[in-house]
């Protein structure tokens, strides 16, 4: 009996010791992830088995630390695999400034992953489902723009460290969900108020012959109003397709009806036409009535989701509906990034 009790006690002590060791190991890993931002081989191996959550989007799911690091590594590999020296530019993430620029890229990755989660949630609420077969079909339909399958697979591995499957799941599938959700939004949105305003403005300049530039400067929405709606000279490719199609079919002095685009309603006046270097150009003015775009709608819908970021370097800003840095120094660095990082193609002001 004494021997059995001794064995049971030894076993109990061993179990307790094992639990303590496991708990201590997990505690160390949690501190490493959320306090010290570890990024070594041990952490990477463990995080593959234990997907530590970095972000939780209530109603849409979580984003793991490993997902963020994997996407950031792909971004880093893309810039470091390019030969920018031929155009007088370079990327170096190894310096103190480079590490901060990479941190800004990490924030962009986090915001994109959050956006993808919300798009997926909103799409599924509308009964939109994108199958793997649909993804395969989309890639096959567009394979020619990549050159050929072998070149695409080679470029994905060289530039991003992705497999063909990674590309389909991380790029093509989210893009298809965004496209289908955008189409659903277009069917849901009511633009009657904006159309009524555009038609009223058209009557003023087309029927009542009010000065187009003056009406544009007072009643047009958007930056072009500051110059009386003057958009200057444009090629076909520089204009939104609906506007371009109409502008190049008009005669000088003619005013169009209200033209609908994904951005809103455009009333355009053709000032001049010319051909320069074998390229057709038009000089137009516009009166613009903005409608709620898909991006505006998506931002508004994001407010319906409670978002929690567990990483110490970031917090969710409910006003901007974006992740932001918690450190004031990083905020300042980010705001001045365009002016201080000239010659670095990883930075676009």
Image (tube, grey):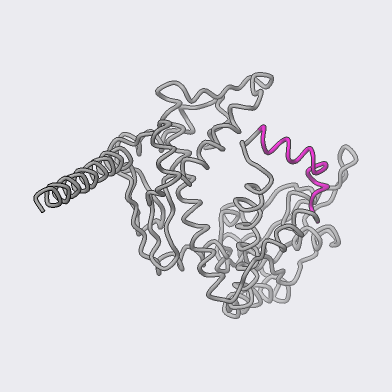
Q: Nearer the viewer, residue 278 or 158?
A: 158
Give the percent coordinates (x, y) of residue 335: 41, 38
Q: Which of 102 and 209 is in front in this view?
A: 102
Q: What predominant SS class does the magenta segment belong to?
A: helix
Image point (79%, 48%), residue name: 235
Q: Quadrant of residue 74?
A: top right
- Residue 33 vs residue 82: left or right? left
Give the percent coordinates (x, y) of residue 233: 75, 47
Q: Is residue 152 magenta?
A: yes
Q: Quadrant of residue 97?
A: top left
- Residue 332 vs residue 264: left or right? left
Q: Nearer the viewer, residue 201 or 23?
A: 23
Q: Residue furthest left?
A: 2
Image point (60%, 62%), residue name: 178
Residues drawn in magenta: 141-158
Q: In which quarter of the image is residue 146?
A: top right
Give the percent coordinates (x, y) of residue 37: 34, 36
Give the percent coordinates (x, y) of residue 191: 60, 77
Image point (65%, 47%), residue name: 167
Q: In this view, does 301 lie above or below 6?
A: below
Q: Residue furthest front?
A: 1
């Amino acid at each position: 009996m004494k021997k059995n009790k001794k064995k049971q006690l030894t076993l109990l002590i061993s179990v307790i010791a094992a639990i303590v060791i496991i708990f201590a190991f997990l505690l160390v890993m949690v501190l490493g992830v959320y306090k010290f931002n570890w990024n070594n081989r041990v952490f990477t191996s463990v995080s593959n088995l234990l997907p530590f959550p970095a972000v939780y989007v209530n109603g849409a799911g979580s984003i793991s630390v490993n997902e963020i690091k994997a996407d950031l590594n792909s971004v880093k590999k893309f810039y470091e695999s390019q030969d920018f020296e031929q155009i007088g530019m370079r990327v170096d993430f190894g310096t103190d400034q480079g590490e901060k620029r990479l941190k800004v890229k990490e924030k962009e990755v986090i915001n994109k992953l959050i956006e993808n989660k919300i798009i997926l949630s909103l799409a599924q609420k509308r009964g939109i489902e994108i199958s793997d077969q649909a993804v395969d079909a989309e890639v096959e339909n567009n394979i020619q723009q990549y050159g050929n399958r072998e070149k695409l697979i080679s470029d994905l591995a060289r530039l991003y460290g992705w497999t063909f499957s990674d590309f389909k799941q991380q790029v093509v599938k989210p893009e298809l969900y965004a496209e289908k959700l955008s189409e659903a939004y277009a069917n849901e949105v009511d633009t009657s108020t904006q159309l009524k305003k555009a038609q009223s403005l058209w009557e003023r300049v087309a029927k009542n012959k009010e000065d187009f530039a003056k009406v544009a400067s007072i009643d047009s929405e958007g930056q072009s109003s500051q110059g009386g709606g003057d958009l200057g000279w444009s090629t076909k490719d520089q204009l939104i397709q609906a506007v371009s199609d109409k502008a190049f079919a008009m005669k000088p002095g003619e005013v169009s009806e209200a033209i609908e685009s994904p951005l809103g309603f455009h009333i355009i006046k053709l000032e001049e036409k010319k051909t320069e270097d074998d390229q057709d150009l038009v000089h137009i003015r516009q009166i613009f009535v903005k409608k709620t775009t898909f991006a505006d709608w998506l931002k508004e819908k994001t407010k319906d989701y409670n978002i929690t970021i567990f990483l110490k370097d970031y917090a969710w800003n409910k006003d901007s509906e974006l992740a932001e840095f918690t450190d004031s120094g990083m905020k300042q660095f980010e705001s001045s990034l365009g002016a201080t990082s000239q010659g670095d193609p990883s930075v676009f002001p």
